[in-house]
Amino acid sequence: MIAALFIGGAAWLNVDYAVLGKLSPNSLLIGAAAAVIAIGATFAVRFLTPYADPTLLPAVILLNLIGLTMIHRLDLGEAQRAVSNGTAAPAADVTTQLTWTALGVVLFIATLIVVRDHRKLQRFTYTSLFLGLLLLMLPLVPGIGATINGATLWVRVGPFSFQPAEMAKIALTIFFAGYLVVKRDSLALVRTKVLGLELPRGRDLGPLLVAWIISLGVLVFERDLGTSLLFFGLFVGMLYVATQRWSWLVLGAILFIAGSVGAYFAFNHVRVRVQVWLDPFAYQSEQGYQIVQSLFGLSSGGLLGSGWGQGHPLFVPYAKSDFIISALGEELGYTGLAAIIMLYAVVVTRGMRASVACRDAFGTLLAAGLSIVLGLQVFVVVGGVTRLIPLTGLTTPFLAAGGSALIANWIMIALLLRISDTARRPNAIVVSPDDALTQVMRL
């Protein structure tokens, strides 16, 4: 944790002196607040989950600090641009993001306090299903649902807005884990083989088809490619973990390809995304402007980057949210971006390690599901920004500006730490006085 705070603090100082030549007025206050948040989370883990994986929290804290630093760097750039244009400087977003971080850590600690035993969450299997579906459909409710950048993902109540799908991914992960614990034996049965592919019973295909239909529903009604891909990939991944049958992955891939091809021909917004992905420079003044600017930024960053505060990340739209990876790639280069992806790899692999070490099936599936969610988000975001796959619109965990995703991700880390603590906790050995005397006599 000391190393994480040192790297985050050094990055912040680098930005200030590169852009301003001095410390910004709020640097000491924000630095102190970030240190208090990190130390508070550390002590909470130390006392509430003393046997939890010791590398998971520092990796997440460092990712969060890097995100705060880049948002601060973009705030300074926007302020300089406003001065040169003779307009009022916009409000700094870094203070808002720090507030969301503090709230996320508070809920992180609250989750550790409330969820003393992750196995009790299995009681809420179907409650989690109902809650998850309700959260997914909430943006479609007239009066509170809001469409931003073509996707209906937001709910607005007065001055407040949030993305309910971020909390839905936790609820649905709990449901998938609880459901698969009960049904995994029947889902693992092999009835027939076709070209070496082990096929389950026809009636056991129902859950996969339901997950596929729900994913398509999100794609159709909310126009959200990222969330649709995330939930379907999550269920197929957890299905494979539960049954150890690679045939489920093949069936999932077939359904995904069929759904993608059908969506391409049926829905214009999907077709536009694919066409821009295939040839973004043909649409660089219209729908392809964002991805083209992102590619230019990554290209100018090169191997080592321009350095903190010395690039032009403001040329990329939504640099604080959807394209923060592009901004980091420009100023930190391929090397810095690879290091950030390695941090994500640490988080995902430590979550999977907790899954493998867990002694109960529900905890194994829940930890695997939460790790899959984090890994899929990173793959989809980085893949979209680098043009490996079409842009989808998911949020980069812990880096991008936004409160809903940050809070949900902190709660997911709390659940992973709780499972890790249970898995790594040594079994208590109770020895009766007679047994103790017998052992002494044998010695």
Image (cartoon, rainbow, N blue to C red):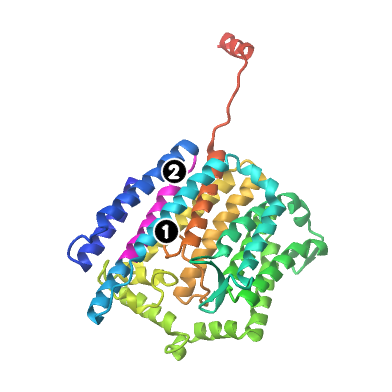
Q: Main secondary structure of the magenta part?
A: helix
**What is the number of the mark on residue 342?**
1
Magenta highlight on residue 15: no
Within 10 Å of disc 1 (Cα), the crowding (few <14, some 14-19, many 20+) is few
Q: Which residues are magenta?
A: 51-72
- Secondary structure under tag 1 reads helix
**Residue under circle 2?**
54
Residue drawn where x is 67% and y is 73% of the image? 216
- Of 254 and 399, nearer the camera is 399
Residue 123 x %, y %? 70, 46
Q: Is residue 304 visible?
A: no
Q: Amino acid at mark 2?
A: Pro
Secondary structure beneath label 2: loop
Assess disc 2: are there few (<14), some (14-19) or many (≥20) residues with their C-alpha within 10 Å of its C-alpha.
some
Q: Position of residue 108 (x, y in %)?
A: 49, 48
Residue 420 vs residue 43, the one in the foreground: 43
